């Protein structure tokens, strides 16, 4: 019995030790599974509309290495992802276009939102954002219930500082809080902005897709849901304003929810976090994706080569992160490389993804035979698109300094079976000496 007890204690100790050693990867795996489950359940779909929104999306695509023309395929309007669910039907037969015959409450709420939008100076587009948000949150009703303590037409939460329960149920109060700015009941004259922030506290909101702008204020668990209401919201605003476009009177605040300037606001990560399928937009609109520049010296099929000839500046392994100051695994090998250095595919393969990867910045991942992938990080430009077949030695990207780092360099990762391995011995086994210095 003592032997069994000892074995049990030893097994428990080993199990706890293994969990402690691998807690980082376990947490990451749980996070990935959670995000995957959310995306499967909620879906990703949004409609990019308006010239400014399309141009911001195209600019993001260019940062990701794609070239997207102003009118993809000769058709105006850009990419429209497949809808996650059926677009709600627009009611007819009421006294106001876009409403049914018994929707008096909805008309009153919409009128309050349009009036608040006019007072805030957000123009026609801002009014559409507000109406679309209220259509999703409450169906344009002054609800006295909601998720947790969410209340009113915009489901604002008293516990988050949006006002008392009585206040946020009132359509006029809720709408003024949604639009923010000097007309908001939460305007702080000392800061020159509302807190909680509304639409006018979101820098660059005028250039965002409606669903992204609404999400910046609402911070919903279903960020892509606002898009399906845009058509009806546009029709309602036109009906309540006489159909004439209303210009935006006030500039967006330079501080607040959005933070930063418009030029730096809409990164690929911003689009994804807001529910917009920026990867699908770029892939669907890429101009002549098969004709992008390649170059480089191809190598025999199945052979391997170094992506560049340069000295190693930081090796694979545990290290103190130079920016964050934490002890963590450096999952690749860094090489000295000025911005714009051509980088070659290490072997034949297929481009798995081109994306923005947090601190890694702009990246390209290539899938090779045998469950092997090579990842190029911190790029300035990618010359291929997902799905492209590449040959070993083909120039597929240019080095840069995107993401988090101390300066321009090239970061190479080699993944086997989904896990990073040291690129130096991995490539040495394939006849490539990464430690050779540039000539």
Image (cartoon, grey):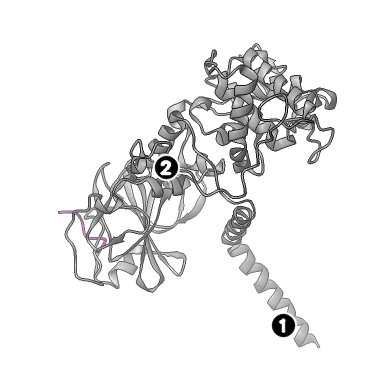
Label disc, if present, on residue 260 of the rendered structure = none
Looking at this view, is 62 or 74 the one in front? 74
Residue visible at 78% across and 35% down in the picture: 150
The residue where tag 1 is placed is 7
Q: Main secondary structure of the magenta part?
A: loop
The residue where tag 2 is placed is 403
Task: Tell me the quarter of the image containing the C terminus.
Answer: bottom left
Residue visible at 63% across and 22% down in the picture: 239
Drawn side of residue 103 relative to residue 259, left or right:
right
- Pointer 1 with pointer 2, Cβ within 8 A: no
Q: CA distance from mark 1 to mark 2?
A: 48 Å
Whether residue 328 appears in this view of the structure is yes
Drawn side of residue 402 relative to residue 245, left or right:
left
Residue visible at 67% across and 25% down in the picture: 178
387 in the magenta segment: no
**Horizontal and vertical percent for residue 286?**
34, 46
**Horizontal and vertical percent for residue 190?**
64, 12
- Specify start and end residues of the magenta stretch as a single range: 434-439
Dot 2: within a 10 Å radius of its alpha carbon, few (fewer than 14), some, or many (20 or more) residues? some
């Amino acid at each position: 019995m003592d032997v069994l007890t000892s074995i049990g204690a030893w097994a428990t100790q080993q199990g706890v030790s293994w969990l402690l050693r691998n807690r980082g990867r376990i947490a990451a795996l749980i996070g990935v599974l959670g995000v995957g489950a959310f995306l499967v359940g909620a879906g990703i779909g949004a409609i990019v509309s308006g010239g400014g929104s399309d141009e911001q999306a195209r600019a993001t695509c260019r940062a990701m290495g794609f070239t997207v023309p102003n009118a993809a395929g000769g058709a105006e309007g850009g990419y429209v992802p497949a809808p996650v669910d059926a677009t709600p039907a627009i009611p007819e037969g009421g006294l106001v276009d876009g409403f049914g015959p018994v929707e008096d409450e909805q008309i009153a709420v919409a009128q309050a939102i349009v009036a608040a939008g006019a007072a805030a100076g957000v123009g026609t587009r801002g009014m559409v954002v507000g109406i679309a948000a209220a259509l999703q949150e409450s169906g344009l009703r002054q609800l006295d219930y909601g998720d947790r303590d969410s209340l009113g037409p915009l489901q604002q939460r008293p516990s988050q500082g949006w006002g008392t329960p009585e206040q946020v149920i009132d359509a006029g109060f809720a709408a003024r809080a949604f639009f923010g700015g000097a007309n908001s009941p939460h305007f702080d004259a000392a800061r020159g902005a509302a807190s909680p922030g509304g639409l006018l506290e979101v820098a660059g909101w005028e250039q965002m897709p409606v669903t992204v702008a609404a999400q910046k204020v609402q911070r919903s668990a279903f960020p892509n849901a606002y898009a399906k209401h845009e058509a009806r919201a546009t029709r309602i605003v036109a009906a309540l304003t006489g159909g004439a476009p209303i210009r935006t009177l006030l500039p967006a605040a330079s501080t607040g929810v959005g933070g930063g300037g418009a030029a730096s606001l809409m990164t690929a990560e911003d689009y994804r976090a807001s529910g917009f399928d920026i990867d699908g937009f770029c892939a669907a609109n890429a101009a002549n994706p098969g004709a992008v520049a390649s170059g480089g010296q191809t190598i025999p099929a199945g052979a391997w080569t170094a992506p560049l000839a340069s000295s190693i500046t930081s090796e694979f392994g545990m290290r103190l992160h130079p920016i964050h100051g934490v002890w963590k695994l450096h999952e690749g090998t860094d090489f000295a490389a000025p911005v714009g250095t051509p980088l070659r595919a290490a072997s034949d393969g297929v481009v798995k993804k081109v994306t923005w990867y947090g601190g890694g910045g702009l990246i390209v991942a290539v899938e090779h035979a045998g469950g092997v992938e090579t990842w190029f990080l911190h790029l300035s430009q990618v010359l291929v698109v997902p799905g492209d077949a590449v040959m070993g030695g083909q120039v597929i990207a240019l080095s840069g300094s995107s993401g988090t780092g101390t300066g321009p360099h090239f970061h190479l990762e080699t993944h086997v079976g989904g896990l990073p391995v040291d690129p130096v011995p991995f490539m040495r086994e394939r006849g490539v000496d990464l430690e050779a210095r540039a000539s």
